[in-house]
Image (spheres, rainbow, N blue to C red):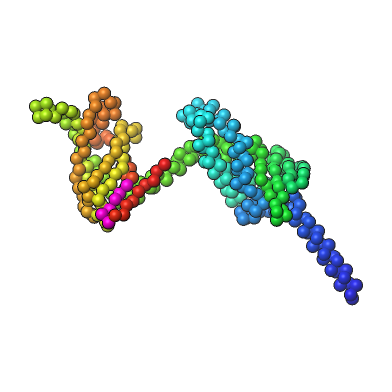
Amino acid sequence: MKKLIVIAVVVLVVIGSSFYYFKGTLRYSLWQTKKAIQDHDSISFNKYVDVDRIVNNLTDEGSKSIESEMNSSTDSLGELGKGLVNAFLPTIKEGLKNSINKSIEEISDGKQNIFAEAKIKEIKKEGKSANIILLNSKNEEIRLNMIKTPEGYWKVVGVNFDDFKKANPEATDAKKIAEDEKKKKAEEENQKYEKLRGVILVEVKEKTFIPSDYMKGAYDDYIQIKFNFTNHSDKNIKGFQGKLRFLDMFDKEIISSPLKYEEGIKSGETKEYLANKRFNQFLEEDKQLKSADLSNMKYEWLPSTIIYEDGTKDEVAVD
C-alpha cells in the first residue's frame, strides 16, 4: 500500500512538473493567446499580448510608410506632409490599439484577428526572447517577437508592420485615420457647444447696412446686426462670449466673428442686442456679408464661456 502511495506521489510530481514546464513554453502562451481570442477573453488576451508595446513597435516601423502615403496623396490630406506625421502618431497608435482589441470582439461577425486561425511555422528562441513565424488561413506569414516575463510565461511584444498591414489595412491607413479623427473631433466639439447652446440661445433677427454720413459725423460704413439673446438656464447670466459663423445657403463660411455680451440676462429673459461691424469695401468677406440676403444665410453659434451672477461659469475647452 505504501509503495502504491509513493508511486502515485511520484507520478503526480512528474505530471505537475511537466505541466509547470509546459506552461512556461512558447507554444503554451501562443495557445492561450489563440484560446483567448476564440473565447473573446480580452483579459487573457492582454495577459499574453502586450498591445501597447506592439502598437508602439508598429508605429515606429510604419511611420515612414505612413508618411509616404500622406505625402503622395493628391487631395488636401497630402498637404499635411512630413511635418504633421508626428502630430498624427497618437491618433494612429490609438487606431491600431482599437483595431487589435476590437478584432477580438468581431470574430463572430466574420472578421478575423490575425492570431485567430494561425498555425506555428517556425520558432527561434534565444534566451528570454524569441522570433515566431505563424501562418494564417491564407498561408501568409505573420512574424512575431516574444519575450519571457518574470512570471514565467511568454508574451507577444511585437508584430511585423507589413504582416499586420496586410491583415489589417484599415488600421494602418493614415488617410482614413486622419479623416476619422477629424470627424470624431468635430462631433466631440459639437457636443460641447450643444451643452452651452442649451443655456444661451442666440438668434439673428435682422441685418442692416448703415452708410457713412459726413453731415452727421459718421465717417465709416457699418453692417448692423440685431440679435435676440435668451437665457434658458435657471440662473442669472452675468455675461458670455463665443464665436458666430455666418454661412451661405451652401454651408460655405462667409465670415466668422467673436461675440461678447457683458450686460447680463436674467433667468428666462430675452434681450435685444445691436452689434455694429465696420464695413471694409476691400474685404471680400465684408462684401459678401453686406450683399447676402439674411433669408438665404445660415449662422452657427459657438459659445465658449458663460459666467453666472453667482460666480460660477461654464466653459468649452476646444483644442
Left or right of residue 172: residue 318: left
Left or right of residue 12: residue 95: left
Closest to the observer, 312 or 293: 312
Left or right of residue 91: residue 53: right
On the image, which quarter does residue 142 sit in?
Answer: top right
Left or right of residue 215: residue 68: right
Residue for point 16% across, 31% down? 210
Find out whether residue 9 is within the magenta segment.
Answer: no
Say which quadrant the C terminus sits in. Answer: top left
Give the x, y percent position of residue 175: 52, 34
Give the x, y percent position of residue 315: 35, 48
What span is colored magenta in the figure? Answer: 305-310
Give the x, y percent position of residue 280: 24, 27
Say which quadrant the N terminus sits in. Answer: bottom right
As drawn, the residue found furthest toward the top would be 282
On the image, which quarter does residue 118 sit in?
Answer: top right
Residue for point 62% across, 39% down? 58
Q: Is residue 38 visible?
A: no
As drawn, the residue found furthest toward the bottom would be 1
